[in-house]
Image (cartoon, grey):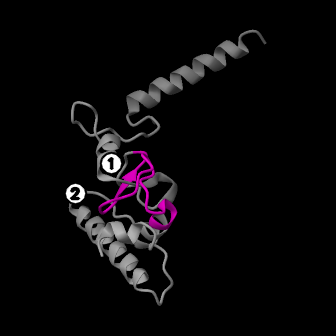
Amino acid sequence: MDDFDILSGRLLGSPKNKSSDDFERLVKKIYSEEESSKKKGRTPVPISIIKQLLINCKGCCQKCKKGLNSKPDIHHIDHDNTNSKDINNLMVVCANCHRVLTYNDDGTVKKPKTQKSPNTKLESKSLLQEAEEESRSLYKGI
C-alpha cells in the first residue's frame, strides 16, 4: 500500500484496521522529514499537528483540491518556516502546488509575510517624530 492509498479513502480506519497503522507510518514519514529540516534552520511541524492536518485534508491537496498521489507537503501560509506550531498557518498540498506557493516566477523563494515593525533606532525615531508632529497638529487649535 502506498501513500496515495492511505490518503484516499482509508485514511481514518479504526485502530484495529491495518489502514490505521498505515496512517501512522505516513505521519512518521512526514515527521522524520520535518525533523531533518532542522539543519536548514526550519522549525519542524509537531507530530500532533501533522496528524490533524492529514485528517482535515481528507486525502486532497488543500490548494488544487485534487487527490494526493504521493507524499503530501506541508506548506507555511505565511512563508515563515519557523512558525510551525500554528495549525491555521499550515496546509497540506501536493508537490506541484507547494512549488507554486513557495517560489516566485523567477525561482526565488517567497519572503515571509510579516508585519513591518521598527527594527532600527532610526526607524523608531522616525515613527516617534511622526507621532509627535501629529500630536502637535491636533493640539494646535486648542
Residue shown at 65% from the left, 20% from the top: 135
Residue 28 spot, x, y in % from top left: 33, 75
Q: Residue 49 carries which label?
A: none
Quadrant (top left/top right/bottom left/bottom right) for the N terminus: bottom left
| Callout 1 amino acid | His
* Horizontal side of residue 23 vs 58, given as left or right: left
| Quarter of the figure with residue 118 | top left
The answer to whether the residue labelled 1 contacts the one labelled 2, judged by CB atoms less than 8 Å apart, is no
Towards the viewer: 82 or 106: 106
The structure residue drawn at horizontal position 32% and vertical position 69%, both measured from the top left corner, is: 3
Is residue 86 depicted above or below 101 in this figure? below
The type of residue carrying mark 2 is Lys
Identify residue for label 1: 98
In the rendered image, residue 73, in percent from the top left (x then y), is placed at: 33, 57
Type of secondary structure dominating the magenta stretch: loop
Which residue occupies the foreground of this view, 61 or 50? 61
Where does label 2 land, which residue?
Answer: 40
Question: How far apart are the two marked residues, 1 and 2, measured between alpha carbons?
Answer: 18 Å
Q: Is mark 1 on a helix, strand or loop?
A: helix
Q: Residue at x 76, y 9 (%)?
A: 141
Q: Quadrant of residue 41?
A: bottom left
Badge 2 marks a residue whose secondary structure is: helix
Graded by Cα atoms within 10 Å as few (under 14), some (14 to 19) or many (20 or more), the crowding at tag 2 reads few
Q: Does 68 appear in magenta?
A: yes
* Residue 11: percent from left, percent from top: 45, 72
The residue under the point 23% across, 36% down is 108
